[in-house]
Image (spheres, rainbow, N blue to C red):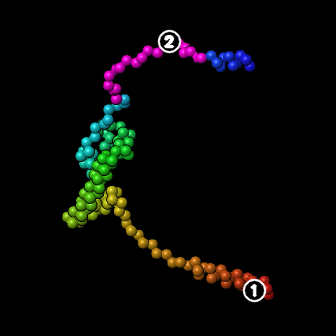
Amino acid sequence: MVLKKEMAEKPKRPRGRPRKPKADTGPKRPVGRPKADIDLDQLESLSALNCTMPEIAAYFKVPLRTLEDRYTHDKDVRAAIDQGREFGKLSVRRKQMQIMNDHDNPTMAIWLGKQLLGQRDKHDVVTEDKSSQALTEAFSILNDMVKQKES
């Protein structure tokens, strides 16, 4: 135990070569790739044409992941894409009305509305509820069976 106390009391000295002070290298260089330049007006125009994210990324020559990250974190990019999409929906709706008024074949307008605007055919299904009638019949059968056992 005496040896442990003596070793603990000794000051530790640095090992190896002493470090050289760092020289001032000037201003720091940025780390990573430079930020991708995306023109918000062009982004909105492409979104109005209902271009997909991969198509937009290819147009701006940036990776899809970069565009998705910018959409997630940059409010201006998100606003440009969302507003462009809404303008695209508006133009589809306008074209639908124009086709309906100008031509007698509305098939294309219906298809575009279903694909891009989430429109659908409404089908009302009416069913007759027979559960109370079935329950009454079941009770009457049970009553008949109980009466038969008693007799």
From the image, give the main secondary structure of the stretch colored magenta: loop
Please tell me whether residue 40 belongs to the stretch shown in magenta.
no
Q: Residue at x 26, y 45 (%)?
A: 40
Q: Is residue 47 visible?
A: no
Q: Is residue 11 left or right of residue 142?
A: left
Mark 2 lies on a secondary structure that is loop
Identify the amino acid type marked 2: Arg
Percent coordinates x, y for residue 137 in the rendering: 63, 82
Q: Which residue is mark 1?
A: 147
Q: Quadrant of the N terminus?
A: top right
Q: Is residue 89 above or below residue 44?
A: below
Q: Residue at x 32, y 22 (%)?
A: 26
Q: Quadrant of the C terminus?
A: bottom right
Extreme residue toward the top, this view:
17
Please tell me whether residue 15 belongs to the stretch shown in magenta.
yes
Q: Which residues are magenta?
A: 11-30
The numbered mark at residue 112 is: none
Percent coordinates x, y for residue 130 in the rendering: 56, 79
Percent coordinates x, y for residue 2 in the rendering: 73, 17
Q: Is residue 3 above or below residue 78?
A: above
Q: Residues within 10 Å of mark 2 (few under 14, many from 20)?
A: few
The numbered mark at residue 17 is: 2
Q: Where is residue 62, by image quadrant?
A: top left
Q: Is residue 14 visible?
A: yes
Identify the amino acid type marked 1: Lys
What's the CA distance linking mark 2 and mark 1?
A: 107 Å
Q: Which numbered mark, 2 or 1, is in the foreground of this view?
A: 2
Q: Residue at x 32, y 35 (%)?
A: 35
Front-most of residues 10 and 41: 10
